[in-house]
Image: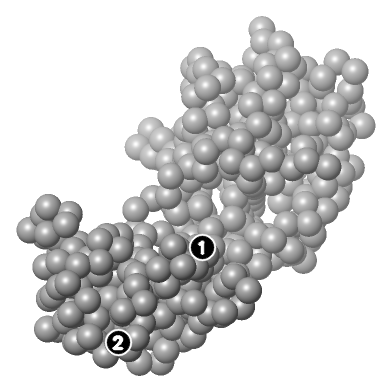
Amino acid sequence: MKRIFFLFLTIAVLMASGTIEAQNVTKKQDWAQFYTFQNDNARWNRVKAVLMGDSITELWWDRDSVFFKENNFVGRGISGQTTSEMLVRFRRDVLDLHPQYVVIMAGTNDVAENNGKISKENILGNLKSMVEIAKFHGINPMLCSIPPAAGFIWRKDLTPAQDIIEINKMIKEYAQSVGIPYIDYHSALKDENGGLPKEYAKDGVHPTLEGFKIMEKILLNTFEKTDLTMDNVVLNSLKTRRSIRSYKPQQIKDEELLAVLQAGTFAPNGMGIQDSWIVAVQNEEIKKELIRMNAKILGTSSDPYYGAPTIILVFGSDPEKWRNSVQDGSLVLGNMMNAAHSLGLGTCWINREMEMFSTKEGKDLMRKMGIDEKLIKEGLTGIGALAIGYPEGEPRAPKPRKENYYRIIK
């Protein structure tokens, strides 16, 4: 798509021509066109959504800026851009604005071969990368269909309608596989030829105001549905928690530890008998014993708890005496991990406590920690442990959720 300028006065033409020339020179040095929004980006913080795209998104703002302002949306569309260029500028034009959501509508210019031929798989790959980057930074991504087009006025040799349909099918399947919204503009706008009718786009590609109004209704309806889930504080915390394997040396605050421990006590448990016991260890001598015992079982000389300032142990009854012992203790650990993340703390689930505390040495350490002798004799079992502390550095990027992770049967 070529940049569209509305020039009505001779002086405006002269001024614009100078701007175009400067931008053409600049683009040779700035392929992704970071310069386009570099000044405006500094004005925004904590917007609801960034609409990331090409000239369709750019013109959307021009033709209905009130829609953006009323909904706390920011448009970041650049005419002519492909998904590759958008991926390169994603940090500056999306992450730096700290939005709750990013709405990604891209692919028209890939199909038009603006930067040369690109496979459908690589178009989808660029979209996947943007989604994964957004998720890693706690931003809720939404993927849009490529709007319909039966032809391009700047590439009359191409017939893109079927290619767009096939790519949209791939986008939709991917969005569903990772549990993010797919916004289908294509179905609402297409004509019998898979293109945009004149009433929605005079040039067959760029929507008129009437076309954008249809898109706005679809987008707001999507937000209405997803705000109940993606914008929920608890659900967002669950989606952004990651295992942390590097911790700052300073100890966590007492009130933070207490909040995490209390979260553990409210975990679901079989028949409400509250079978689990939780022990938080900050004593350096006992921590050294835990590290030594766990490392011995693991067969390593390194710290299996990753240098965390606090270690939280979870115990349960002998599984042969209480069949839900491991399940109940696992839920306690899960509750504490999610509570810790919501407080800005990092955790990592550590195994081998069952082996550690089945030995005489382990039982002696239980006694040293003040655990009731009766419980020890009855077969108190180590279920697992958490390393917990303030994260050191950025967590690893999350792995994409596997396809067909869940199924709904009605």
Position of the N terminus, as image quadrant, is: top right
Name the image colouring: one colour
| Position in image of residue 239 (x %, y %) | 53, 58
CA gap, disc 1 and disc 2:
22 Å
Residue 309 can be seen in this image: no
Q: Is residue 166 above or below residue 40?
A: above
Residue at image point 17% right, 72% down = 360
Tell me the kind of residue under disc 1: Arg
Residue at image point 83% right, 42% down = 410
| Position in image of residue 404 (x %, y %) | 61, 36
Residue closest to the far left: 301
Instruction: Answer left or right for 13 relative to 279.
Output: right
Q: Label 1: which residue?
A: 323
Secondary element at tag 2: helix
Q: Which mark, residue 193?
A: none
Q: Label 2: which residue?
A: 373
Instruction: Answer left or right for 302 relative to 235.
Output: left
Secondary element at tag 1: loop
Residue at image point 38% right, 85% down = 257
| Position in image of residue 314 (x %, y %) | 37, 74
Discs 1, 2 touching: Cβ within 8 Å: no
How many marks on residues?
2
Instruction: Answer left or right for 173 relative to 295.
Output: right
Q: Is residue 254 above or below residue 66?
A: below
Tell me the kind of residue under disc 2: Glu
Camera-side residue of 258 and 252: 258
Rendered image quadrant of residue 298: bottom left
